[in-house]
Image (cartoon, helix red, strand yellow):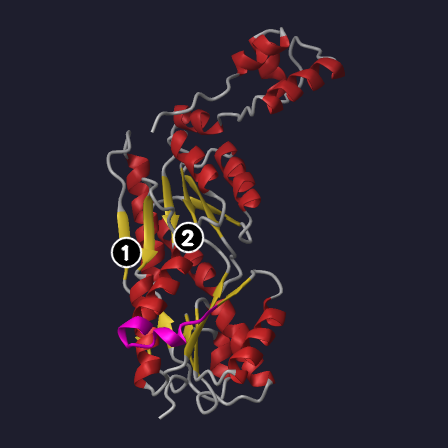
Amino acid sequence: MASKRKTTIKDIADAAGVSVALVSFVMNNMSGGKYRVSAKTTKKILSIAEALDYQPNNAARSLRKGRSNTIGVILSDISNPFFSDIARCIEDKAYQYKYTVIFGSTDEDAGKLDNLIKVFINKGVDGLIIVPCEGSRQYIEKVLEANIPLVLLDRTIPDLEVNHITLNNKKALALAVGELIEGGSRKIEMISYTWSVSNIAEREAGYQHTMKQFSLSENICIHRLKYKNIPDQMERVVTEAMSKGVEALVFATNTLAIAGMKTLYKHNLRVPDDIAVVCFDSSEAFELYYTTVSYIKQPVEQFGQEALDLLIKAIGQKEQIKCSAIMLNPELVKGNSSSRK
């Protein structure tokens, strides 16, 4: 991939008709010195810099002085137990490498991701670990074009050469649906998101493939919820499912699972007598439930360790030689929620 030329201080100086030293003085917000810059000139230089999308090359400064020994980790939601547990693993592992970690959350907002990437790069991080969200491809490509070491976590971007760590999501849903079928369910529906991100797409594909394998194509139904106002949407989905005589639900994420279990409890629906369920990831909330919950367990510690190891390796390479793709295996933890027998 050809690198896009970055705007330099000289470009700004040429456009503004001033010296490089003066632009450097303004951009670095220096005090003292031989320059006394008027507010008008300062505003002109800053406006041109913004128009040319100038990014201070703090990363380059760090490399001239030696690495910053800091990495940036951008997650979708650090309050989500899955991501917070991974964050802790990355932080612990980074400490062993004598690296400091700074974190950010996108809330599945591509604009926030773009801003966090810029902030972290300007802080001179040596590399980035990112959970990409919907609409983030262009921002990930910019990181690659800038030749900044990068590892994508949990999700990847189709047809983009980039280091990534993902779960075997199709296998995960095959385990989940297979468990429900073994437990006596046939009318099995899935509750997912409207996102077009890789892990959700793979989980939906795994659900559909397994249902077809067991000759249950006519029962395939995926309810896709928006990320906001999940409880209201879950209310509608559960009501609709029960009116159709659905026997089991499989949840695509832990956030959906928690909202779903709360809704079932609110409607006095007994699990698995009235409806069987398999969730994605565990939750402390499930420990308070009257029955043990069957769920897909992800190797959280391995996610964190593999991501950090891969990033450190990429940082150590002077040139990107070959992208690494690591796929981790899920595990089904059996509870009583999945069997109607």
Is residue 315 shown left or right of residue 337? left
Density class for disc 1 (Cα within 10 Å; few <14, some 14-19, many ≥20) is few
- The residue lying toward the viewer, choosing from 333 and 312, is 333
**Residue 327's disc number:** 1
Q: Which residue is drawn at 54% across and 37% down?
A: 119
Q: Which amino acid does label 1 sit on?
A: Met
Q: In this view, does 161 lie above or below 251?
A: above
Q: Does the magenta stretch include residue 129?
A: no
Task: Give the residue number, with chain letter if any, for mark 2.
Answer: 91
Tell me the residue at 57%/89% (across/down).
Answer: 268
Q: Hey, which quadrant is residue 301 in on the image?
A: bottom left
Q: Which x, y percent locates residue 195?
A: 49, 56
- Span of residues in magenta: 211-222
Please determine whether, in this image, residue 243 is positioned above or below residue 254: below
Look at the image and tell me whether residue 28 can be seen.
Answer: no
Element under disc 1: strand
| Image spot of residue 211 (x, y percent) | 33, 73
